[in-house]
Each structure stands twice: as C-alpha cells, then as structure tokens.
Image (spheres, grey):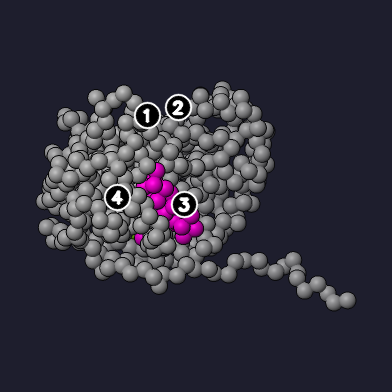
Amino acid sequence: MTEATISKGTDWGYAPAPESTDHIRLKERYGLFIGGKFVPPISGKYFKTINPANEKALAEVADAGEKDIDRAVQAARQAYEKVWRRMSGRERGKYVYRIARLIQERARELAVVESMDGGKPIRESRDVDIPLSAAHFFYHAGWADKLPYAFPAKKVSPIGVAGQIIPWNFPLLMVAWKVAPALACGNTVVLKPAETTPLTALLFAEICQEAGLPDGVFNLVTGAGPTGAALVNHPDLDKVAFTGSTEVGKAIQKALASRGTKLTLELGGKAAHIIFEDATIDQAVEGIINGIYFNQGHVCCAGSRLFVQESVEEEVVAKLKSRMETLIVGDPLDKNTDIGAINSRAQCDRIREYLKVGVEEGAELFQTSCAVPNRGYWVRPSFFTKVAQSHRIVQEEIFGPVLAIQTFRTLSEVLEKANNTPYGLSGGVWTDKGAKIFKVTRGIKAGVIWANTFNKFDPASPFGGYKESGYGREGGRHGLRAYVELS
Ligand code: NAI
Ligand code: MG
C-alpha cells in the first residue's frame, strides 16, 4: 500500500482569482452630465479619482463650481416643468424600467468599476451593490403608475427639483436609493456623488442617455464638499436628500432651516448587535462577521457595538477570532477577497486614529495576523475588548473594520446599554426565543433591527434612522413619501 499523499501540513490557500478588467473602457477625463449631455465644467477644474488598492489614478473628473451647479439646476427645472411632471406615471415607469434593465446588462462592468474606484471586494459589488441597484429601479418603476394606491384618498403630485448628495461606501446603490424614487414620483434630479467614487455615477449618466431619458431629468455634478455645499445653497431646489456624516448633515439642516426646502437625512450609526446565550453561536458569529467586516466596515448600519451575554462571552470571542483569521484581506478584484481596500487615505487615517485612541483609553485590541499589500490603504479586521460605555470607540462611528465588544447579564441591562448612543439607525439580535426578539426590537430606538441575521436589504423595506442618524425613510412605501406632495 502506498502512503497517503495528502499531508495535514499542506497549505490549502486559494490560488489568485482576479476578475478581468479587459472590458473596462474608462475615459481619461469626464465632464459633468447636464441637460442630457456631458459638458466640460465652467469652472475649468478637474481632479483625479484613484484606485485605493494601488493608489493609481483611474480618470479625471470635473470639479463643479457654483455656475455649473446653477446650470444643472436650471436644466432640471426646465425638464421638470416642460416634460417630466406632465408625463403620465405609466410613461415615466417605462424609463425607470429601462434604466433597471440597462444596469443589469452592464452589471459586470459596473461591478468591476465599483471595486476599482472604491476598494470594495468584487464579490460584494457583483453580488450585492449592483443587483440591489437594479432591484431599486425595478421596484420603483412598478410604483410610477400606482402612486394613488400608495396614498389612498390623496391627490399625489411630485415635489419638483431634488438636489441629492451621496457618500462613497455604496456609490451606485446610493445613486439608486436616491434617483429611483425621485424619478418614479415625477421629480427631476441634480446628483452629487462622493469625490472618491464618482465613476459608477458617471456610467449611470451614460445609462440614462442610453435609456433615452428626456434631457435634464437626471443631472450629475461631480466635486467634493464645496460642490455639495453649493448645491444645497442653490435657491431653486424643492428638496434635498443627503446621506453621509452627521456633521455635514447638521450643517445642511442649518443651511436649509430658513427655507421651505424639504429635507431627508441619512447619517451615521453605531448599532448594537446583541448575542444572547441561547443563540445558535456559530450562526451568530457569521452574523457578527457580516455585521462589521462587510464592505470594510464602511456601513452606516454596521453592527459596530457587540453585546455578548456573559455566559457565552469566552465561546463567542474564541470562535470570532478563529473565523476572523480566515478572512482574506487584499486585492478587491480577486474573487476570493473578503475585505478590500479602505476607501481613501483620509478614511484610513481616521480608522487608525481610532485604533490608537482605543488602546490609549485602556481597551484591549485584537487584529488578525494576515499580510496586507504594501501599496494602497488597508486595515486588518480588528476588535476591542475591555471597553467601557464612555470610550470614544464605543460612542463614535469609526466606519471601518473595528468592533467594540461588551458583555451583559440581563435583557434590561443590554437595552439600556444599547440605547446609550446619540445614534438610532440599526440593531441586531440573536436568540432562540421569539419573545426576546420582540422585547429587543421594541426596546431599542432604531430604524431597522435584524433578528438572527444582519445587513439584509430590500427595496420594499424602509430604511432610515432616529436621533442623530437622521430622518426620513428610503425604500418601500415610506420612502416614496419623501418625493411626493399629498393634498
Ligand atoms: P461626508 O459627510 O463629508 O461626505 C458625504 C458626502 O457629502 C460627499 O459626497 C461629500 O462630498 C459631501 N459633502 C461634504 N461636505 C459637504 C457640505 N458642507 N455640504 C454638502 N455636501 C458635503 O463624509 P466623509 O468626510 O467622507 O466621512 C467622514 C465620516 O462620516 C466617516 O468616517 C463616517 O463616520 C461618516 N459617513 C457616514 C456615511 C453614512 O452612510 N452614514 C457615509 C459617509 C461617511
Ligand atoms: Mg476612487
């Protein structure tokens, strides 16, 4: 008999499986998308968007100034008055459907560009971001001619021109969350994507052209904070929708306080993720991983505060450590990658600062031992134990792959700790008992609470927060409300 040829010492690592980029044709330079055409910025200024995994420039995009914003808002106003508000819901719906279909057709290209521009693993952009973006357009296309059924016994009309500002963590998905309900309800749009991830929004503008969307219904202005501020301050907007930091959200709220402009804000979060001793621990560990390490932790509803019942703390932490050691950090375009690049140098610095602060505050840091590439921005999956409620790493949104772990003994104790936060966006609970689920979901002040799962999204399900997490809902019938006038 021959000896077994497979020894236990064999390295069972994955071979590299990079997604091809051969089909990607980025332009060297992108203008603004105004009135159905790509136009150079009046400002004459451009900036580079880079790939955070290798710090190489991908393309130049326009840096829109006040005059550019004015031109875009005027185009949106004209399209609103002359075309879009007058069109029947049935006709509008056809355009929104067409956009959904074109996102599906170009899904592979969109997924690869999303991962190149923002650093998220291709598996996530391919399986989550892009399909969900299409789903949002399909869902809202269905509502376009049925709005009277969404709001029975009311006269439903559009609001007008919407200025929309989105962040960099889910670039195309945030385009979909903002644009799909606006268009379906008969509004026109000027959208500003985040400065580090403008490329899929620019491809989306091409999709609007391909779909034959009437000129000016969707307009895109690229730029950083000052461009966003100029958009918010334009006097001819009827509605502003913002997703991003609580700090900028508050500034926008102040700027609009004296005007009649409608506003919805989707801001930060610091979700409590609660594991009871009767939970299926292995599944709960998967939930913790998904809750905080999905999209490098750049998730407003991330389960960033973990509460483990004392009796299972040792088991949960041990299993979490060994599961974390299997996470592959690296090339976002590799299909095996679990954790990609941190979106920008600034965000990477911010996360590293919090890692330092946590240690200084006396918490105990664990990081996985994986290697990370030399170039680009990376943070290894991390968690803190021995943390106190007053620690900054427990109170503030880190927006990176960093978890703070605390323990609890009783349900009332964990509810009190969970609610001890200025935020109120999301939460999660793992338990075998239905009654406990109801007590937790009723006891926590948050817009979304997942039970025995985490980070599940559906266009039919409203999403949004309480307290400093903002107000207004996106998705579902509740989300339509932000884009209609009722009388
Ligand atoms: P940010 O709030 O500055 O950026 C979000 C968007 O707002 C971008 O498009 C940006 O260009 C725009 N913006 C910036 N200043 C503006 C202004 N004065 N007026 C109008 N628009 C403006 O967020 P940033 O600096 O990229 O990230 C900082 C922190 O914010 C993160 O560490 C995270 O904690 C939080 N954040 C939360 C997000 C969420 O989804 N809730 C998304 C992005 C960031
Ligand atoms: Mg970029």
The residue where tag 1 is placed is: 467
| SS assignment at label 1 | strand
- Majority secondary structure of magenta residues: helix
- Where is residue 264 drawn, in percent x and y? 29, 35
The residue where tag 4 is placed is: 95
Using the numbered discs, state the Cα–Cα distance from disc 4 to disc 1 in whole angstroms.
Answer: 36 Å
- Where is residue 297 drawn, in percent x and y? 46, 48
Lower sequence index among marks 3 and 4: 4
Q: Is residue 10 left or right of residue 412?
A: right
For label 3, the crowd category at 10 Å Cα-Cα, with few meaning under 14, some 14 to 19 and many 20 or more, is some
Residue 315 on the magenta span: no
For label 2, the crowd category at 10 Å Cα-Cα, with few meaning under 14, some 14 to 19 and many 20 or more, is many
Lower sequence index among marks 4 and 1: 4
Badge nearest the viewer, 4 or 1: 4
Circles 3, 4 touching at the beta carbon (< 8 Å): no
| SS assignment at label 3 | helix
Q: Is residue 459 left or right of residue 201?
A: right
The residue where tag 2 is placed is: 445
| SS assignment at label 4 | helix
Circles 4, 1 touching at the beta carbon (< 8 Å): no
